[in-house]
Image (cartoon, rainbow, N blue to C red):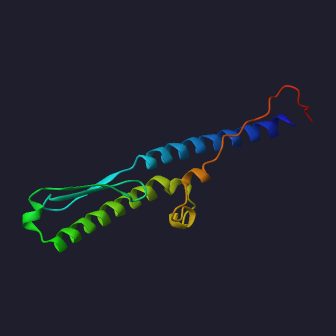
């Protein structure tokens, strides 16, 4: 292998490995992502996780005196929607550098898809010793 070719391959491997590290860092941030949305009156707050799953719902005890059951249900659903939308926006923001422009994130990471399956593995270069140079 010529020195020029080896240097080119090493540069490409280095760039690939740096991109893999950035992607793993983004995935780490994504896996820890939580968002809490709170109603205007601060009576209802909902926290959702990285895939929009509800992690907690907190209700001020006064909410039972102020809202009817249907109003409470609607307020909870509104906060779930708001928090889920924020998670989706943050996910797109974190993953945007890794998705080709114009390709919707949902097309790459559809419902139920795992980002882990897309994470690249580091490139291991063969040792320079013992190989033939041409």
Give the percent coordinates (x, y) of residue 110.
Answer: 53, 65
- From the viewer's side, name the closer residue of 39 and 94: 39
Can residue 104 be seen here? The reply is no
Residue at figure coordinates x 11%, y 62% from the top left: 63
Q: Position of residue 36 (x, y in %)?
A: 28, 54
State the image quarter where residue 101 is shown.
Answer: bottom right
- Name which residue lies at 14% across and 59% down: 43
Name above or below for residue 93 compared with residue 28: below
Q: Which quarter of the rendered picture does the C terminus lie within?
A: top right
Question: Is residue 129 left or right of 44 when viewed as pictured?
Answer: right
State the image quarter where residue 109 is shown.
bottom right
Residue extending farthest top: 129
Give the residue drawn at x 43%, y 57%.
51
- Looking at the picture, tell me which residue is in the foreground, 35 or 16: 35
Is 85 displayed left or right of 116 in the figure?
A: left
Res. 35 visible in picture: yes
Q: Residue 8: x percent and y percent?
A: 75, 41
- From the viewer's perspective, tell me whether residue 73 is left or right of residue 129: left
**Residue 32 vs residue 127: left or right?**
left
Out of 89 and 37, give the one closest to the viewer.
37
């Amino acid at each position: 292998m010529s020195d020029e070719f080896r240097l080119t391959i090493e540069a490409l491997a280095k760039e690939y490995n740096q991109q893999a590290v950035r992607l793993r860092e983004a995935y780490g941030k994504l896996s820890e992502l939580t968002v809490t949305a709170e109603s205007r009156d601060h009576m209802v707050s909902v926290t959702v996780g990285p895939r929009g799953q509800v992690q907690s719902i907190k209700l001020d005890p006064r909410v039972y005196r102020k809202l009817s059951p249907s109003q409470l249900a609607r307020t909870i659903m509104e906060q779930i929607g708001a928090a889920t939308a924020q998670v989706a926006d943050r996910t797109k923001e974190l993953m945007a550098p890794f998705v080709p422009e114009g390709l919707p994130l949902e097309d790459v990471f559809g419902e139920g898809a795992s980002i882990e399956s897309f994470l690249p593995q580091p490139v291991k270069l063969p040792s320079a010793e013992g190989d033939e140079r041409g």
